[in-house]
Amino acid sequence: MILPEPSGPQVHVYWRSPGSEQKPTARPHSRTVSLACRTDVRASKRPLWFHSSLSVLSPTEVGGGSWAFCFSSAVRSSLQKQQSLPVRPIIPLVARISDQNASGAPPMTVREKNRLDKFKQLLASPNTDLEELRKHSWSGIPREVRPITWRLLSGYLPANKERRELVLRRKREEYFGFIEQYYHSRTDEHFKDTYRQIHIDIPRTNPLIPLFQQPAVQEVFERILFIWAIRHPASGYVQGINDLVTPFFVVFLSDLTDIPEEHVENFDVAMLPLDTQRNIEADSFWCMSKLLDGIQDNYTFAQPGIQNKVKALEELVSRIDVDIHNHFKKYEVEYLQFAFRWMNNLLMRELPLRCTIRLWDTYQAEAEGFSHFHLYVCAAFLIEWRKEILSMVDFQGLLMLLQNLPTIHWGNEEVGLLLAEAYRLKYMFADAPSHYKR
């Protein structure tokens, strides 16, 4: 698809050969954004777009003017996808070593240190500039400051630094007031079916990660989900909401215990002081509630939000890749058969949790990230598997592929590429509705 010539200022593409330390050569192009482009040997010398080894530039970091990401088809060939449909082994919670500044990993680069310093500077300000914080968060949040940044971007904490401790204390007390007021009613006739469904679903939440199989953690999730359901009678509890607690729980656990995210997988939460456990629980509840406030129509009766998003995904794919769309029609694959879960669980069942955490950095930085931008991420995610989809020539094979996409080895770089393509699609379609319709 060819974009019209933009009228904004010209930006540049930067080309750099593998291993080159020389300053890249700038080549002006009015339709592309200033990103680093390397030549990838595996991709037959075609360009692979990325910004640093771990992230892409946020749209706002690039500067003014109209632009779109150039996302080469080589991206797809460069990500080494498995041809078979694997039985998923135990998935590392957060960390491929190459994606983390963990013990034993390469030292933090100058750029990473500068980014971390910028975050710390913003967070230390008497009144944090939330727009500036969103701009820097779009391309990923350093894990050292992710917990406080998530609390701010979700709207749980105020921008004013002096008020944060007071708000934290008040909201945590308020949550446990709800526990005292409502939790005993879980055995009442009116609520026992809700509690029973939550009790059944909790062990299914990330069943391969030991952390979430601990009785203490499952009890925390039961309380969070039951209180949320009681306070939101329009939707109540719906399967899939249980998954949405996990990223917050992991991020806040790593914050309040000083345990690196990659080490929480086997951490015994029952060993923590009770006050710490309570703080993690309350913060997870409030941040999950803020998220769900923006997508509650996904979970009301008949789940109209999800139905509409799946239909929008079908229309979008019919415009951006007619071959995939026609392939689904030929073999009678309905988008609802695979994309319902993508919308209901925000791709959490399709990606390792480490990738979800990185994805949510951008969702919380992007306007309407969970409710609107997610549609374009799903479209980009589907097109990512174009070759595999078109190679399947029967209904059963297609559904098995779409429900078991081999993302186990994905990390920050792959998520960054996915987000870049999603932003390109959003730029072309959401901001130019005439392109969207036939």
Image (cartoon, rainbow, N blue to C red):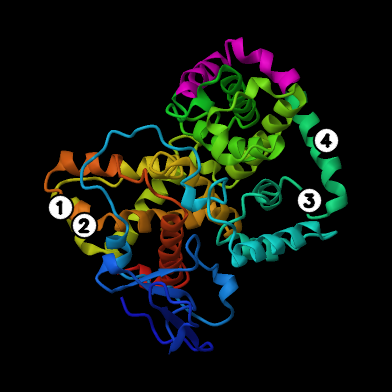
**Which residue is at 40% across, 70% downward?**
49
- Which of pointers 3 and 1 lies earlier in the amino acid sequence? 3
Q: CA distance from mark 3 to mark 4?
A: 13 Å
Q: Magenta stretch?
A: 179-203
**Foreground of the two, 133 or 3:** 133
Q: Secondary structure at mark 4?
A: helix
Amino acid of disc 3:
Pro
Specify whether residue 213 is in view.
yes
**Which residue is at 63% across, 65% downward?**
135
- Which of pointers 4 and 2 lies earlier in the amino acid sequence? 4
Q: Secondary structure at mark 2?
A: helix
Q: CA distance from mark 3 to mark 1?
A: 51 Å
Q: Secondary structure at mark 1?
A: helix
How busy is the neighbourhood of tag 1: few (under 14 within 10 Å), some, or many (20 plus)? few
The label shown at residue 158 is 3
Q: Is residue 345 left or right of residue 145?
A: left
What residue does disc 2 label?
387
- Which of pointers 3 and 2 lies earlier in the amino acid sequence? 3
183 in the magenta segment = yes
How busy is the neighbourhood of tag 3: few (under 14 within 10 Å), some, or many (20 plus)? some
Query: What x and y, as percent, mark residue 172?
Result: 77, 32
Q: Secondary structure at mark 3?
A: loop
Query: What x and y, as percent, mark residue 345?
Result: 45, 40
68 in the magenta segment = no
What residue does disc 1 label?
391
